[in-house]
Image (spheres, coloured by chain):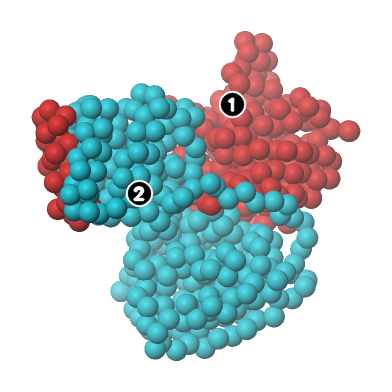
Chain colours: A red, B cyan
Amino acid sequence: MVGLNIIVCLKQVPGTTEVEIDPKTGRLKREGVAAVVNPFDEYAVEEAIRIKEKLSGRIKVLSMGPPMAETALRDALALGCDEAWLATDRVFGGADTLATSYTLGLCIKKIAPFELIICGLKTTDGDTGQVGPEIAENLGIPHICYVNKILDISESKIKVTRMLDDGVETVESSLPALITVTKEINQPRLATLMGKLRATKAEIRKITAADVGGDPNRFGALGSATRVIKVTTPPPPLGGEVVKGSPDELAERILQKLIECKII
Amino acid sequence: MLVFAEQKAGKVHPIAYELLSKGKELACELGERLYVVIVGGGLDRAIKELVHRGADKVFVYDDPLVADFRDDPYSNLLVGLVREEKPSIFLIGATAMGRSLGPRVAASLGTGLTADCTGLEIDPKTRLLVQVRPAYGGNIMATIICPEKRPQMATVRYKVMNEAKIDPTHKAEIIKKHVEPRFLLDRVKILDFKPVAEEVSIVDANVVVSGGKGLGDPKGFKLLEELAQVLKGAVGASRPTVDEGWTDYHHQVGLSGRTVRPTLYMAFGISGAVQHLAGMRTSEVIIAVNKDAEAPIFNVATLGAVGDLYEVIPRLIRKVRAYQRDRNVR
């Protein structure tokens, strides 16, 4: 086994989803919100490291983001990734999933070769889960979503189980391929002090629009097919009645409601 | 106006009926016809069902080679059809299959895809599809348009929209399409499938009895199972309980779990975080029991009871059984 070249795609997201909208601008308030590695991507990084520990290889972690996304990449390096790449350029900004996956696809071609690309299932801010499969389509490689376990992997094939709505499917794919992983796949480790020290000194390699070539009309907001025209907070829900009392009184009250609503 | 009808073993997934209902509405506004595409094997019965639910034209890819879902062939076939028919809008269910297939198709077509839409409307002035969806774990709602690229694609979660009514007299054009071997790439093979051992799926159940962190202990689910049995329902769970390993992912209700819309949703020891509400707030009747009077779940509950679920549930089970005995209901 020569070892696998693995690329992990990673995104830095707001540390909390408890976001607010600035009533004056109609936009999300971003100040004071700490940024973290997208939780699902932590599982992707962990899985890459586990594969490398078993079969040897090289892990390149890639992120498209503003300069501050460097900290997320350093977190990944601290855990055991080998190279960190940050695709950062003003023209990449404001991208929807189509433009993001186009940009990342070009970046991946630039940092190739690779046998396996690992992405998190989705991000906690965008919540779409689309970028992984779209990157796979752009690169002309197969993809498998919702992977919860890698059963076997070699230079040319990967065998996994994936979680569908009604059960678990065992799937085998040729490599190169892209997988998106669920939180069931592993338990991410914590970085060691040594790892963190190494990461602070490591080089984060940058990729700009000029570096990737491609069609500049397909980057960022310009290359996006969709546009967010409004963000609002959902209306507060209308509650019903709230009752207190002894457990027996509460149980009786609930029983009456079940009868009233013809549940029983 | 094109809709993808997901199916398994020749049985149409009910999400297709919901998409047909919404699709019909959108098509009428645009003055367009409602097309549906189905891919699978042994589809004769499925085709009839789609016709009865209002489709004007049904494109059928019926071949044993595509009987089982695989992203490559399904994506290739759909992309081919879209290129031929050029629909203005293409809707896909936000199921596991749809959320894997949709993006692949969208990227191939170079068009926009909006995931998990909870609202779809036509803007009367621009005639664009206006897509509304939650983001940031459901804390905000984003309104999105796809002004230029076509088709405008959206995925919609199961149980968010209403089903199209059945009209056995409705007629439609059936177009049987040939499954060309060159589309059937062999890169991915299905080796095995283990269905989830579940009597009633939470998504289809009339009654869902859910537990959250307030259970304090995985044993709490045994109590919920008893109550669910008495009410002929299924057991659901909040995300933290699944993360803790108290129950498995197929019971999870919420933004990263399932959306359910039962007649009755009971929330025990669930605080009511936005992410959980996203998965159940459209239930007809919501009854919540929680020790914390300030729990946000009480904002959406039809009836909220502040108390200890371990004291309330056993009493409730006894009362329900007694009531059923008295009425001779089994």
Q: What element carries label 2?
A: loop
The residue that appears at 35% across and 45% down in the rendered structure is B229
The residue that appears at 60% across and 63% down in the rendered structure is B105
Q: Is residue A53 visible?
A: yes
Image spot of residue B310 (x, y percent): 27, 27
Q: What is the number of the mark on residue A122?
A: none
Q: Nearer the viewer, residue B192 or A62?
A: B192
The residue that appears at 31% across and 40% down in the rendered structure is B227
The answer to whether residue A49 is left or right of residue B313 is right
The answer to whether residue A29 is left or right of residue B178 is left
Q: In which quarter of the image is residue B163?
A: bottom left
Q: Is mark 1 on a helix, strand or loop?
A: loop
* Three-letter residue code for mark 1: Gln
Q: In which quarter of the image is residue B299?
A: top left
Instruction: For marks 2 and 1, give the one nearer the viewer.
Output: 2
Chain hosting mark 2? B
The residue identified by callout 2 is: B233
Position above or below: B185 against B124: above
The residue identified by callout 1 is: A187
* Three-letter residue code for mark 2: Gly
Q: Can residue B109 be seen in this view?
A: no
